[in-house]
Image (cartoon, rainbow, N blue to C red):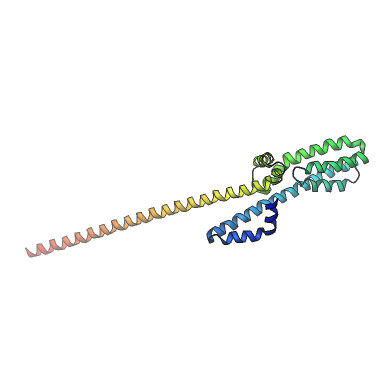
């Protein structure tokens, strides 16, 4: 928390100092990595907002037909709280169940079953796909990131699993593209060297052929001179 607070306050200044210490080539690559990491974190935020919107609309579609009072307010609260990782689904369920129990107790069981089913669908089916598209990683890795995050750091691991996974994915892709670029440059350099060697060999052969032709001309001239002398 202390590190996060310091980075929040002086993050830009620390980054500028870090960039200033790098060479121009490394500086451009570091800026590219930072922009990619920012896009990954922004994708996580957008994905969370999309999930909250989906859950809020679906909650409204459940509560209105069942006649639950304040359905619109409850749907908005549910959508907003679903943005919170780990605790969001629990918090989203509490006001809906309390208002239903007080205002429409006859449909309490229906609301309980349907909202729990909705949460399972949103969290386990829709959520990984939305996060996959927003961050750019496969849904399987979304599950793995959440499992590893909860196992390593508990609640904080779940909170940070998606943005960290997106940043790691960015670094891995960048390293892969960098390796591909280096390999392409190496292959191009090898081809250039081979073409230069072939051109040099061809030039040498041409010089040898020219020398042989000149020698043949010289011998022919000497033969003609010798023939005239006889």
Left or right: residue 68 versus residue 173 is: right
How many numbered marks appear?
0
**Percent position of residue 102, x then y:** 93, 40
Residue positioned 87% across, 40% down in the render: 97
Q: Farthest front residue?
A: 2
Which quarter of the picture shows residue 10?
Answer: bottom right
**Image quarter of the C terminus:** bottom left
Q: Nearer the viewer, residue 209 or 85?
A: 85
The structure residue drawn at horizontal position 64% and vertical position 61%, both measured from the top left corner, is 13
Image position, residue 31 (x, y; %): 60, 58
Q: Position of residue 47 (x, y in %)?
A: 72, 48
Q: Position of residue 183 (x, y in %)?
A: 48, 50
Residue at x 66% of width, y 51% of height: 40
Up/down of 111 relative to 13, above or below: above
**Quadrant in the picture for residue 126:** top right
Nearer to the camera, 202 or 19: 19
Q: Is residue 150 left or right of residue 202?
A: right
- Position of residue 214 relative to residue 46, above or below, is below
In the image, residue 199 sits, relative to residue 108, either above or below, namely: below
């Amino acid at each position: 928390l202390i590190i996060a607070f310091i980075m929040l306050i002086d993050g830009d200044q620390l980054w500028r100092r870090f960039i200033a210490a790098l060479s121009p080539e490394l500086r451009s690559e570091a800026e590219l990595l930072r922009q990619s990491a920012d896009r990954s974190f922004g994708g996580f935020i957008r994905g969370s907002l999309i999930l909250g919107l989906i859950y809020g609309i679906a909650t409204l579609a459940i509560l209105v037909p069942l006649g639950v009072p304040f359905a619109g307010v409850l749907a908005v609260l549910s959508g907003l709280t679903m943005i919170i990782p780990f605790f969001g689904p629990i918090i989203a369920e509490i006001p809906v169940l309390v208002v239903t129990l007080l205002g429409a107790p006859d449909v309490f069981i229906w609301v309980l079953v349907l909202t729990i089913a909705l949460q399972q669908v949103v969290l386990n089916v829709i959520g990984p796909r939305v996060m996959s598209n927003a961050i750019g990683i496969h849904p399987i890795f979304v599950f793995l990131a959440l499992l590893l995050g909860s196992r390593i750091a508990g609640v904080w691991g779940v909170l940070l699993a998606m943005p960290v996974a997106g940043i790691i994915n960015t670094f891995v892709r960048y390293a892969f593209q960098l390796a591909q670029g280096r390999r392409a440059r190496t292959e191009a350099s090898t081809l250039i060297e081979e073409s230069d060697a072939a051109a040099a060999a061809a030039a040498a052969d041409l010089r040898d052929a020219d020398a042989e032709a000149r020698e043949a001309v010289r011998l022919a001239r000497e033969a003609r001179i010798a023939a005239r002398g006889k």
